[in-house]
Amino acid sequence: MTLRWSATSPYVRKVMMVAIEAGLDGRLSCRATDPWSADTDLPNDNPLGKVPALTVEDGTVLFDSPVIVEYLAALNPAAGLLPADGPARWAALRFQAVADGICDAAILRRLENNRPDGEKSAGWMERQRKAVARALDVLEAEAATLSATPPDRPTIGTLAVVAALAYLDFRFGHEPWREGRPALAAWFATASDRDSVRRTVPPGA
């Protein structure tokens, strides 16, 4: 399997953590890809021009990250990364949705901030900041549910949340998201103490 890959993408990091936890990382061939390069051939694999994109054994290309991680989880259901049914399954998928939403908003804010002076929208950036803050408040309120997942049995949802919070530390480390969210901060510290997290730290983090 070939993964179109960028070391700083939180979505790629989520996929890599899932692959490691599922024992599938050895089956992945990671192809470094700059989705912003003018001459990238990434649209040949993903018409949306985004990473990650995964080419599986039969040549099918899967995108984006929620589809890829569900595919990987299905290759090794014994790992328990996506519970088969019931409330645990929906909790995992819901946490993934919240986490991916945090990443979406944080990346949009960062891209807007990188625009030339005179083209930036302070209102747009503030809208994305508030979206992240609201999502973090939800995770703080639901930290007990996160903590109910055994540390040695992560799910797609808990790994996605780890990737999202780590991305905030990576790109917005000057903003103290932990303040006022002690339960979430404590959970993150424990959940981050895994090989899959340590092995996927982006350069410069």
Image (spheres, rainbow, N blue to C red):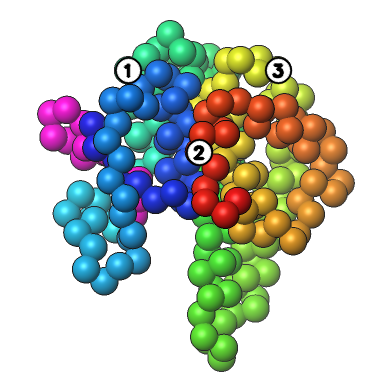
The local crowd at label 1, few if under 14, some if 14 to 19, many if 20 or more residues have their Cα within 10 Å, is some
Lower position in the chain sequence, tag 3 or tag 1: 1
Q: Residue at x 76, y 36 (%)?
A: 184
**Where does residue 182 sit, x and y in percent of width and height?**
85, 38
Residue that extends furthest to the front in the rendered view of this protein: 204
Say whether marks 2 and 3 touch (CB < 8 Å): no
Say which of marks 3 and 1 sits in front: 1
User: Mark 3 — residue?
Assistant: 148
User: Gap between marks 2 and 3, in whole Å?
Assistant: 24 Å
User: Gap between marks 3 and 1, in whole Å?
Assistant: 25 Å
User: Gap between marks 2 and 1, in whole Å?
Assistant: 21 Å
SS at badge 1? helix
Lower position in the chain sequence, tag 2 or tag 1: 1
The relative height of residue 153 versus residue 104 in the rendered view (above or below) is above
SS at badge 2? loop
Amino acid type assigned to the residue bearing label 1 in the image: Leu
Task: Write the start and end of the magenta stretch as one range.
Answer: 50-63
Say which of marks 2 and 3 sits in front: 2
**Where does residue 123 sit, x and y in percent of width and height?**
65, 76
Foreground residue among 121 and 159? 159
| Residue 157 makes an appearance in the image | no
